[in-house]
């Protein structure tokens, strides 16, 4: 199937499950931004973190998300599909997007899954960072919201005539030329570091 095919994949025969796989991009972005803001506010007003700590750990969380984004895209979304179950899972979470990249309602996980992600991030990072979790997870979730926003506009709008144009170019290369390059959507940082940045043509 051509990667620029218009339309939408049918993931489930059950109409309820099928409908739950679609969402307007504004819904998960809003969920993550509201939770991130709430975490910062709660952490500061209940004296779990100071304002300076909140700012510092927020940016640390955002930085951590760029690595999570890269690793998830490279090793989960593009996982080995050597068995039928792996192939089915990979198609559900990402393969359908490569077949139908213009399907705007499948550019983000459904809201229920988004909330589960946010909860998992909080409990995992609570073990690692203690009370600083309020800043770290706020940064992680903000990074996720920015990833969703960038991913949406890259697919929905033509590239801008500024420094952000490179994000459009990188993601187009990933979709239409080389699936094993340009795994970073919101940032090319880890593609540079880990050697998966597409080579520029002269």
Image: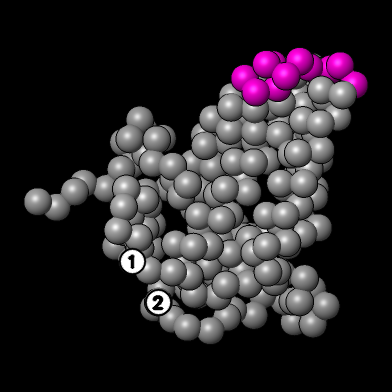
Nearest the camera: 93 or 37?
Answer: 37
Neighbor class of circle 2 (other Cα within 10 Å; few <14, some 14-19, many 20+) is: some
- The residue under label 1 is 176
Q: Position of residue 129 (x, y in %)?
A: 73, 18
Q: How is the image coloured?
A: one colour
At a point 31% along the width and 52% down the height, the residue shown is: 162
Judged from the image, the secondary structure of the residue bearing numbered disc 2 is: loop
**What span is colored magenta in the figure?**
46-56
At a point 68% along the width and 69% down the height, the residue shown is: 24
Whether residues under marks 2 and 1 lie with C-beta atoms below 8 angstroms apart, the answer is yes
Alpha carbon separation for disc pair 2 and 1 = 8 Å
At a point 57% along the width and 80% down the height, the residue shown is: 8
Name the disc covering residue 4, or none.
2
Q: Is residue 54 magenta?
A: yes
Judged from the image, the secondary structure of the residue bearing numbered disc 1 is: helix
Q: Position of residue 163 (x, y in %)?
A: 32, 48
Nearest the camera: 39 or 119?
Answer: 39
Q: Position of residue 21 (x, y in %)?
A: 71, 69
């Amino acid at each position: 199937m051509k990667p620029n095919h218009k339309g939408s994949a049918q993931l489930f025969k059950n109409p309820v499950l099928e409908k739950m796989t679609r969402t307007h991009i504004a819904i998960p972005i809003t969920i993550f931004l509201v939770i991130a803001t709430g975490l910062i506010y709660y952490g500061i007003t209940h004296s779990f973190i100071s304002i300076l700590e909140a700012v510092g750990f927020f940016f640390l969380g955002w930085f951590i998300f760029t690595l999570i984004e890269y690793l998830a895209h490279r090793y989960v979304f593009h996982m080995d599909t050597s068995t039928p179950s792996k192939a089915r899972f990979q198609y559900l979470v990402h393969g359908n997007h490569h077949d139908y990249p213009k399907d705007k309602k499948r550019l983000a996980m459904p809201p229920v899954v988004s909330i589960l992600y946010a909860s998992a991030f909080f409990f995992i990072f609570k073990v690692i960072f203690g009370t600083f979790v309020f800043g770290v997870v706020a940064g992680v979730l903000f990074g996720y919201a920015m990833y969703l926003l960038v991913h949406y506009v890259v697919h929905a709008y033509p590239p801008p005539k500024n420094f952000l144009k490179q994000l459009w170019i990188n993601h187009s290369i990933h979709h239409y030329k080389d699936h094993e390059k340009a795994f970073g959507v919101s940032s090319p940082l880890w593609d540079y570091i880990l050697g998966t940045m597409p080579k520029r043509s002269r």
